[in-house]
Image (tube, helix red, strand yellow):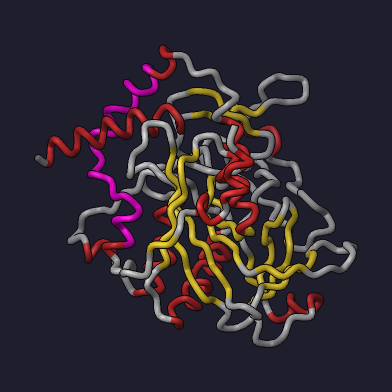
Amino acid sequence: MLQYLQRKAVKILALTVVPLLTFTPIVYAQSGRIVPAAANKNKVCICDPKDPFDPRARMPQGPFKGRCMSCKQRSVRLLSPLETIPYNAAPDMLVIANFNYKGKYWVAKIPKNAVEDVIFQIQYYNVLPSPYTAHSQIRFRLKPGYEAILVPQSIGVAPTEIRMRDFVYAANAMLVEGGEWNPATGLFDFFAIAHEFISLEDRIKDAFEYKLTDRVEQIRLALTPQQKQELLMSAILQGDRDRTNSMYDTLNKNCTSEVLRAVDRTIGYNPKLAQKGKPEVFISMPTGPAVDEALFKGNLTPDKLNKIIIERLAQLSKIPIPTPPYEAIVRRKLVNSKSKIANLEVEFPREFNSSRP
């Protein structure tokens, strides 16, 4: 039975993950010629010279080590009391930078004990649907009257305030500046991880406009009021600590494993002990602005797909049976009779329907 399940898992992975995920980034100069990976190692990686929290990030390792990272994504930054002074934050507020809203970066001031609900979102796909292949992220819903206050973080921008009750923490794949994808046989060490805090509005747009999205399930996590606040801080600290210095790995370090790492730290759950030493493996589809575009730029021929599958099968056959994200939160006893809420496309039907062809 175990061998059957393993073969089944391998087949699902080969058919769903490999054809969609195995893209190699090739960087082109304006002349159209391929630029070697080391070509811009001496370049100053500045996205916005007026932004005091521009990370000036470089790819930490892999074939593009040292290249400037994309300006479209950033990891969250927790600000020190000194750094919060220009933003007039109350002493008891949690203040973060690099909050992504409508393509711009903001400082977000979050009141103490503001979290009302923590909602685990699982984005499934319509290409050979599988419970194993999904994108996971965490939605934070704040209490009425405790909204996050967004203010511009770049110097010289006209002061404005935006109040926001819902936002998302997602660990997304991130590529180098100017990177593109073409079919190839490798994925690992081509992506770094961006620990992003993004408005729910933006994530709705991303999910619904993404042509492979089937549905986005939402599960309210069974946490105590204190754990809800602690999970927000855990996610922020994780992003602040890791920045973009960790590499994305489809099997071992991806969107699901990273959001669960923040959850586990909050609830005191040790997956290795709980699983008696067996690894917990999640199969994730990388997400992010460049990845979204990549799936529809390349024309994958049957010959290319067959080559990819054949070269990956040997590796895939050695992995343990993967864990569906929903099963992982059930295993952690975070699901009860009040957990299941409407899917995101049901909660926001107008946005969903307007994005469908």
Residue at 48 percent of width and 56 percent of height: 137
Q: Is residue 155 left or right of residue 264?
A: right
79 over 189 or under it: above or below? below
- Asked which quadrant contains residue 147, the reply is bottom right
- Asked which quadrant contains residue 330, the reply is bottom left
- For the C terminus, the image quarter is top right
Q: Visible in this render: residue 259?
A: no
Which residue in the rendered view is the most extreme toward the left? Answer: 1
- State yes or no: residue 232 in magenta: no
172 over 13 or under it: above or below? below
Locate residue 11, reporting x and y percent: 27, 30
Point out the stretch of residues depicted in magenta. Answer: 306-329
Locate residue 324, reporting x and y percent: 31, 49
Q: Is residue 93 left or right of residue 172?
A: right
Q: Visible in this render: residue 319?
A: yes
Q: Pick the residue in front: 150 or 85.
A: 150
Locate residue 35, reporting x and y percent: 67, 26
133 over 276 or under it: above or below? above
Classified by dominant secondary structure, the portion drawn in magenta counts as: helix
Q: Pick the residue in front: 98 or 165.
A: 165
Locate residue 1, reporting x and y percent: 9, 40
Residue at 47 percent of width and 72 percent of height: 231
- State yes or no: residue 326 in magenta: yes
Q: Is residue 270 left or right of residue 257?
A: left
Residue at 70 percent of width and 52 percent of height: 56
